[in-house]
Each structure stands twice: as structure tokens, then as C-alpha cells.
Image (cartoon, coloured by chain):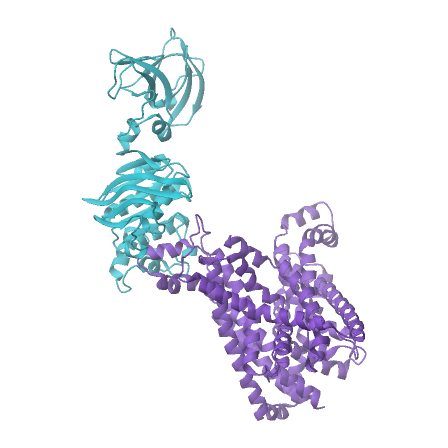
């Protein structure tokens, strides 16, 4: 018999889903109200230019991140590359650097480093680790004996690579490259700093420079459509992940020609991805900053931590409710709820923010330009991050425990409180930590929705960089790198798994 | 005709020899089993033959061509030696037919259907590997290895991941298929029964060398030394001395199977099924333990000086406490102390 989940969980889940889909729904509603103006806006040369810029950036970044990530993963996991433990970490570490901090590093060290090429470079370096981690994971868990069998059947190294290895890593490569595409499409801070005009920048500038909000909304709709196209492509191209036999026996590393050459190449990549931004942060931090700016830095730090912790707590509560009803109870509302929260997550932060600006200004003046508005944006953007951390712990709760609890005369709520929640505590903590660390780095939504005069580390860094106050900006970047990045890396199980496999 | 020839094959991991000067000839169309306990170097042998690992000494010849020595190595893909790994390691993205066809011309559907028929996989031709049982996966792996008509096929403990019932059946299937296809095969295993039942010849491997090579009956009934005897199956080891061409033991005078010299002392190895227990009220040996297996029973017998294990027909086995006379059927192998005999 299918059990019904406690009503309080369903209410929480439905509420969270509404928060996630309202921005999109409102944007579409708005579009349908002013169709003519929207169409006119979309056909303007400026919009088309933004679209072409964005498409060029998304396509080139995705391709280069794919090539770099796969190459790094293959070299680290499957070959006799020297210092592979070092490179296993070095390939993942750019994850710890928010893209706009990286962009700050490049611009501040190389004045005039603006436009398409710099944006492509910084975005590639920032996103390649996603491909690297996913492909490395699939290589680690793949059965390398299949490669040996292929060789004994007369295939040379290249044929083995294309005929056996590639099909195995293809699902991971496709999934991660489309993640890269979404990430690049949504990117705001880095491309703004590097002064390349993409659709996200178009939304922001149009909103800021004119009172006509429909124009900004029209550009935002283009972003929505592109997001849906990428999501559809992901589903189409994903390919089935095949179960392979667990590998057994000794892992033989492929001997490659010129392995020190490859090591040098990977070192150069690490230098570009992490060395340049860190060098810039250190260089400008050493110059020092004014006393007034230090006061603002402390304020921004307090605000950032406060926002992030509250958002982490709220999102984790929602995430627990959602994962319980979707995984634990497999409730009927599960599917729409899951779909809803993923829609919010996939949309660029700037689109969510713009929609909430309209909503707030028109219908909810009480919470417009307050922290509540920022919090709503965070929920829409980061709920799936919390869900991801809870999936495994929740799916591992034995159903029998519930039944035992009920046979001992406990109600559903008592079981939830006394059995289920204590068991998933580690997952709850992980979810809270993950969301908190992610929220700290958020830029576009915070920038648009924050209460007047309030700054987080990210928004202050952005304004200072925009005004070329690099020495004042650097400590913000350093703090963001240390606060958000390094703990996130410590939390990342995947990197450690790859490391284990390389030793 | 000689197919494979190992001459003094050696392989070290660090300072430790894993293969310590192996010599072996494998003949065309033969199925040979390399039998050894785990960690004895069996898998390393397979990997050096396949060309996945290089060797540190000696030579490997295939069809009288040198394919591996310390300085020369034919690439794995150029050897014409295929492998059936322990885990079937099928290509997860290819169907059964595509897996089998992987090493041959894509248009050679004839060979693929021949192998599907031979391995009785016709019904499963279009399945994906993840939808196959363990036994089916191994049959596909076998067909895949046979498809290019390799000079030789290597099987690395191909049945060890399967449950016992399936193992027996698959063992027969594999032998039948390999023989029907006329392939030359080398199989490594740690399972004595498997080696003895499947192979034309068995090579017993110990500490990186072959302790004995011979046909299964010879290996089982005339083990080269006490170590091989106990490794191949239960043995009762008792001391004896040669007098007048007989072995004098606590169980009486026994006939030696091998050549012995007068006056030497040593040990004999007797299989439990070679004891015959005759109920006899006046006997001074007694049954003190009995484990019933159905088809037979294992009895523990206390003689005046020894405690031995004997196998007896199940339903007719003597009861505990029964006095019995212990006879030894046939001749026994005598191993003189301090001598190691190798055939």
C-alpha cells in the first residue's frame, strides 16, 4: 500500500516549487501581455548581436572545455603521466575560483584584456573542471579490461580510444558539456568584467538604462528559450549510462610518448586557470586598501555570511521536504515538484532576478528590495544543489524502519522526527554546507534585488572592479576564493575518488 | 605441431620473481589448464602471453616466431592471441552480436552467426550486455575471443565469478565450443576439479615455476611430489621405508608405483578413496567420525598408530564405533626424503 506523506511536507514542497516556477511563469505572462512590443524588441539588431555573441561564446567554450576536460581526465586516470596526484588536484582547483574573480584577476593584471577572446579563455578555464570531474569519474569506474580485450582483438591504441573508451565516457562528456553550456549561457559577472556583450549583460544594461522593463524582459525570454534548447539537447544527447563490470586486477597505465611534455602542458593550464587569478589577488592585496574600505569589507563579509546561512537553512528545510516526498514516499506530486525546481535552477540568475523585480515592484511592494526578495531568488536558483546532497542519504533509509516504528504505535510525524530525520542528519548538514557556500558567491540576483546600500562580497567586488579600483577589490576576491572555494573543494567527494584511483 | 613455446620465461615485480623460468610447450588444438593457488603468478602469465605486460627474461614463441623476449615485444594487437577475462568485460555499449563482431570484418555476419549458434546465443543476439546473466556474458566473451580465429585463446579464471551449478554446465559448454572451433587454448584456474575436468593437459604452477605438467589422470594419480599431491585433492600422508621393494608403513606393506631404491625413507600419499574399510569385529582400527554426503561419506578412522580419512560409498559406510580393517587399494606414490622429483 502506498503511504501518504505527512501534509506538512507536501505543503513545504509545493510552496518551494511555486517559488521556483513563479519567475518563469510571470515572465511568460508578461510576454503574452505585450506580444507586439516583445517581437519588435527581439528583432532589433542589438538583440540579434547579443544573441550571436552569446551563441558564439557558448559553443566555443563548450567545445574547448570538452577537449581540455577529457584530455586532463584521460591523462590523469589512464596514463603514466608524472606527478599525477598533483595534476588531479590542479585540474579541479579552478572550481574554487568564482568566474568573476578569475575575470578580475586577468583584467587587473592585463589592462585592456576585454572582449570575446578573454571571455572565452576565462570561461573555458572556469568550466573545464566540470568535464574533467565527470569524465574522470566514468574512467575510474569503467572496466579497463575491455580496453585490453580490444587490443587482443587486433585494435591499435587509437582504435581502442575511439571504439571502446569514448563510448564509455560519452554520457559523462555529453552531460557535463551541456552543464558547461548552461553555465556559460547564464554567466554574468565574468563576461561583464571582461566587457563582452552577451544576452545576460543585455538584460542587465537594458534594465538599468531604461525604464522600459519590457525590453529587458524580451531579452530575458531569449535566454529562457536558449536554456530550454540546451536542456532539450541534453536529454536527447545524453545517451544511456551502461553498467559495466567492476574492474578487477591490476590497473595498467598506458605508456605515452612525451609524458613530460603533457605534464608541462597541464602545468601551463593550471597556471592560466588558477595561477594568474591568485597572483593578481595577492599582488593587489599587498598594495593595501583604505581604512574606510576595510570597514565596508567587514560589513560585506557579515552580510554575505548572514545571507548565505539563512538561505542555506531555508533551502535545506525545503530540500529535506522535497527529497522525502519524492524519494521516500514517491508521492504523486513528486514529478511536477522535481520538474519545477529544476526549471528554476536552469534559468540564468539574471532572468530570475529581473522577473522578481517586476513582481516585487508591481505586487509585493512590502518585500521589494528587502532580504526576503533576495532569499526567494536564492531558493529558486539553488534548491537543486540542496537536493543533490540529500539524494543518497534519503534513498538509503530502510523502509522497514518506518514499518517497525508504526507497529510500535508511533504516528507518521513521530517517525519523521525520531527516526527519519536523525538518520539523514549527515545529508542535511552536507546540504546546508553546500548551499551556503554556493550562495556566498552568487552575483547577478543579489546585485538586482538587494536592499539599497547593502553589499555582499560579490556585489562590492563587482562595483570596485567596474570602477577599476583593483587594490580595493582584491581582498574581496581573496575572501570569496577562501570562503566559498576551498571548503567546497574539501566537500567534493569526486576529486578525492579520482585521487584514490590515481595512486 | 607446436603452437606456443615458453623458454625460461621470467618476470619480476621489483626483486620478487613472479614467473621464475617457465618452460612449456602447447600443441595445436590443445586445451591446456594452468592450475595454481591464488597469487602464484597465473594472471601474470596470461598478461605476458597476451602482451599486456613485458617480460624480464626468456622467450615466448608463437608458431615458432619470437613474440616476446627482454628486448623484443610484438604489440598485443599484432599477436593474434585473444583473451576471455575473469569478469567478462563486454563492451557495454554494443549488443551481443556487435561484441562478437568487434575483432572481425564488420560484414562477416557468417562468422558471427556461426559463433552465436556454437555458444547457443542466437536468441540473445540483439541484447545489451547489462541484460545478460553472468553465464551468458561469459559465453559472449568466449565467442568474441574466438571470432577472429586467433592463433591462441587465453581464458583467465573464466568461471570463478559464477555459482557452482552454472560453472559445471558452462565448463562443458566452453570445452565443447573451443574444440568445435578447433582453437588452441590456455586456461588458468585455481580450481583443481575445473582443471582436471576441462583440460587435455594440466600444468601445475607453484612459486612461479611448473611443478608438474601432464594429462589429468597422470597428474592426479601420480603427483610429482607431496606438495602437488595435497594441492590436487585430499591425501593422507604417512611415513614409510623401502625394504625388499615394498614400502613398510604403519598401514602395512604397500606397493610403490614409482622406482625406489632400497633402504630410503620417505612419505607416501594416499587418496581417501583409495582406502577400503572392511568391517571386522576382531580389527584394531575403529571408525571415530563420519560425514555423510549422499553419494559418499568421509570417515575418520583411528588405527593403532594413525588417524586417517577414508572415503566410502554413501549408504554402505560403516557406522561410528565399528571396528574395521584398513586396506590400501593399488600401488602408492613414494616420495623419498630430501629429493624433489619433477617429471
Residues A382 and A71: in front is A71
- Res. B233 image quadrant: top left
x and y, in percent, of residue B171 in the image: 33, 42
Residue depicted at 31% across the width and 45% down the height:
B174
x and y, in percent, of residue A199 in the image: 60, 83
Residues A281 and A179: in front is A281
Residues B183 and A324: in front is B183
x and y, in percent, of residue A99 in the image: 62, 73
Q: Colour of chain B?
A: cyan
- Res. A443 image quadrant: bottom right
x and y, in percent, of residue B168 in the image: 35, 40
Q: Which chain is purple?
A: A
Residue A171 in sight here? no
- Give the quarter of the figure containing the N terminus of chain A: bottom right
In the picture, measured across the screen, residue B320 lies left or right of residue B337, that is right
Residue A250 in sight here? yes
Amino acid at each position: 500500500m502506498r503511504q501518504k506523506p505527512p501534509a506538512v511536507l507536501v505543503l513545504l514542497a509545493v510552496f518551494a516549487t511555486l517559488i521556483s516556477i513563479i519567475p518563469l511563469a510571470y515572465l511568460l505572462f508578461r510576454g503574452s501581455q505585450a506580444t507586439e512590443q516583445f517581437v519588435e524588441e527581439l528583432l532589433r539588431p542589438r538583440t540579434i548581436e547579443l544573441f550571436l555573441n552569446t551563441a558564439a561564446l557558448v559553443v566555443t567554450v563548450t567545445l574547448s572545455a570538452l577537449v581540455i576536460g577529457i584530455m586532463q581526465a584521460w591523462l590523469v586516470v589512464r596514463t603514466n603521466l608524472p606527478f599525477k596526484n598533483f595534476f588531479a588536484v590542479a585540474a579541479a582547483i579552478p572550481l574554487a575560483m568564482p568566474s568573476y574573480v578569475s575575470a578580475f584577476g586577468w583584467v587587473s593584471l592585463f589592462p585592456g584584456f576585454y572582449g570575446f577572446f578573454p571571455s572565452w579563455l576565462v570561461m573555458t578555464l572556469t568550466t573545464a573542471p566540470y568535464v574533467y570531474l565527470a569524465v574522470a569519474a566514468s574512467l575510474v569506474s569503467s572496466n579497463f579490461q575491455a580496453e585490453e580485450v580490444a587490443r587482443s582483438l587486433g585494435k591499435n591504441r587509437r582504435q581502442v580510444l575511439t571504439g571502446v573508451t569514448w563510448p564509455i565516457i560519452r554520457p559523462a562528456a555529453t552531460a557535463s558539456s551541456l552543464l558547461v553550456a548552461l553555465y556559460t549561457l547564464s554567466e554574468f559577472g565574468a563576461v561583464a568584467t571582461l566587457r563582452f556583450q552577451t544576452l545576460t549583460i543585455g538584460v542587465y544594461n537594458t534594465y538599468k538604462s531604461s525604464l522600459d522593463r519590457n525590453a529587458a524582459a524580451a531579452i530575458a525570454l531569449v535566454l529562457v528559450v536558449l536554456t530550454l534548447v540546451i536542456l532539450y539537447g541534453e536529454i536527447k544527447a545524453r545517451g544511456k549510462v551502461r553498467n559495466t563490470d567492476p574492474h578487477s586486477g591490476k590497473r595498467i597505465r598506458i605508456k605515452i610518448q612525451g609524458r613530460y611534455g603533457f605534464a608541462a602542458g597541464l602545468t601551463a593550464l593550471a597556471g592560466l586557470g588558477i595561477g594568474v587569478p591568485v597572483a593578481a589577488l595577492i599582488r593587489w592585496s599587498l598594495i593595501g586598501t583604505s581604512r574606510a574600505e576595510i570597514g565596508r569589507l567587514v560589513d560585506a563579509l557579515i552580510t554575505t555570511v548572514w545571507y548565505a546561512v539563512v538561505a542555506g537553512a531555508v533551502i535545506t528545510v525545503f530540500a529535506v521536504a522535497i527529497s522525502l516526498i519524492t524519494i521516500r514516499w514517491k508521492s504523486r506530486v513528486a514529478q511536477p515538484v522535481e520538474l519545477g525546481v529544476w526549471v528554476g535552477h536552469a534559468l540564468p540568475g539574471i532572468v530570475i532576478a529581473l522577473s522578481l523585480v517586476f513582481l516585487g515592484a508591481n505586487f509585493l511592494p512590502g518585500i521589494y528590495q528587502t532580504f526576503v526578495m533576495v532569499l526567494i531568488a536564492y531558493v529558486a536558483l539553488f534548491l537543486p544543489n540542496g537536493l543533490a546532497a540529500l539524494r543518497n542519504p534519503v534513498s538509503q533509509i530502510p523502509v522497514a524502519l518506518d514499518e517497525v516504528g508504526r507497529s510500535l504505535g508511533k504516528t507518521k510525524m513521530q517517525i519523521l522526527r525520531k527516526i527519519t530525520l536523525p538518520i539523514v542528519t549527515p545529508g542535511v548538514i552536507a546540504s546546508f554546507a553546500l548551499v551556503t557556500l554556493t550562495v556566498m558567491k552568487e552575483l547577478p540576483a543579489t546585485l538586482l534585488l538587494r536592499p539599497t546600500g547593502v553589499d555582499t562580497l560579490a556585489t562590492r567586488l563587482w562595483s570596485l572592479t567596474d570602477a577599476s579600483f583593483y587594490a580595493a577589490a582584491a581582498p574581496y576576491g581573496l575572501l570569496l576564493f577562501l570562503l566559498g572555494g576551498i571548503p567546497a573543494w574539501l566537500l567534493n567527494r569526486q576529486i578525492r575518488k579520482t585521487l584514490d584511483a590515481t595512486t | 605441431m607446436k603452437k606456443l613455446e615458453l623458454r625460461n620465461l621470467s618476470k619480476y615485480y621489483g626483486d620478487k620473481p613472479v614467473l621464475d623460468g617457465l618452460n612449456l610447450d602447447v600443441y595445436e588444438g590443445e586445451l591446456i589448464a594452468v592450475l595454481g593457488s591464488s597469487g602464484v603468478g597465473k594472471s601474470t602469465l596470461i598478461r605476458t602471453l597476451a602482451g599486456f605486460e613485458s617480460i624480464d627474461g626468456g622467450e615466448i614463441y608463437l608458431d615458432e616466431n619470437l613474440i616476446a623476449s627482454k628486448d623484443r615485444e610484438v604489440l598485443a594487437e599484432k599477436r593474434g592471441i585473444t583473451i576471455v577475462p575473469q569478469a567478462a568485460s563486454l563492451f557495454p555499449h554494443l549488443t551481443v552480436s556487435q561484441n562478437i563482431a568487434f575483432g572481425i570484418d564488420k560484414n562477416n555476419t557468417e562468422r558471427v552467426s556461426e559463433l552465436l549458434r556454437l555458444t547457443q546465443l542466437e536468441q540473445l543476439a540483439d541484447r545489451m550486455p547489462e541484460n545478460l546473466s553472468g553465464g551468458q556474458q561469459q559465453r559472449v566473451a568466449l565467442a568474441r575471443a574466438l571470432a577472429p580465429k586467433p592463433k591462441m585463446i587465453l581464458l583467465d579464471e573464466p568461471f570463478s565469478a559464477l555459482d557452482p551449478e552454472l560453472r559445471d554446465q558452462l565448463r562443458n559448454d566452453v570445452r565443447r565450443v573451443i574444440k568445435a572451433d578447433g582453437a588452441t587454448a590456455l586456461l588458468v584456474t585455481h580450481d583443481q576439479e575445473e582443471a582436471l575436468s576441462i583440460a587435455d593437459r594440466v600444468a601445475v604452477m607453484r612459486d612461479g615455476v611448473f611443478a608438474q605438467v601432464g594429462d589429468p589422470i597422470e597428474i592426479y594419480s601420480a603427483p610429482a611430489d607431496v606438495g602437488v599431491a595435497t594441492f590436487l585433492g585430499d591425501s593422507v600422508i604417512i611415513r614409510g621405508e623401502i625394504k625388499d621393494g615394498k614400502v613398510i608403513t604403519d598401514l602395512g606393506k604397500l606397493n610403490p608405483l614409482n622406482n625406489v631404491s632400497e633402504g630410503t625413507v620417505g612419505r607416501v600419499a594416499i587418496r581417501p578413496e583409495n582406502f577400503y574399510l572392511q568391517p571386522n569385529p576382531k580389527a584394531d582400527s575403529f571408525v571415530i567420525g563420519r560425514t555423510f554426503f549422499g553419494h559418499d561419506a568421509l570417515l575418520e578412522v583411528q588405527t593403532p598408530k594413525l588417524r586417517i580419512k577414508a572415503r566410502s560409498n554413501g549408504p554402505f559406510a560403516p557406522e561410528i564405533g565399528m571396528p574395521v580393517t584398513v586396506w590400501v587399494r593399488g600401488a602408492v606414490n613414494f616420495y623419498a626424503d630430501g629429493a624433489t622429483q619433477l617429471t
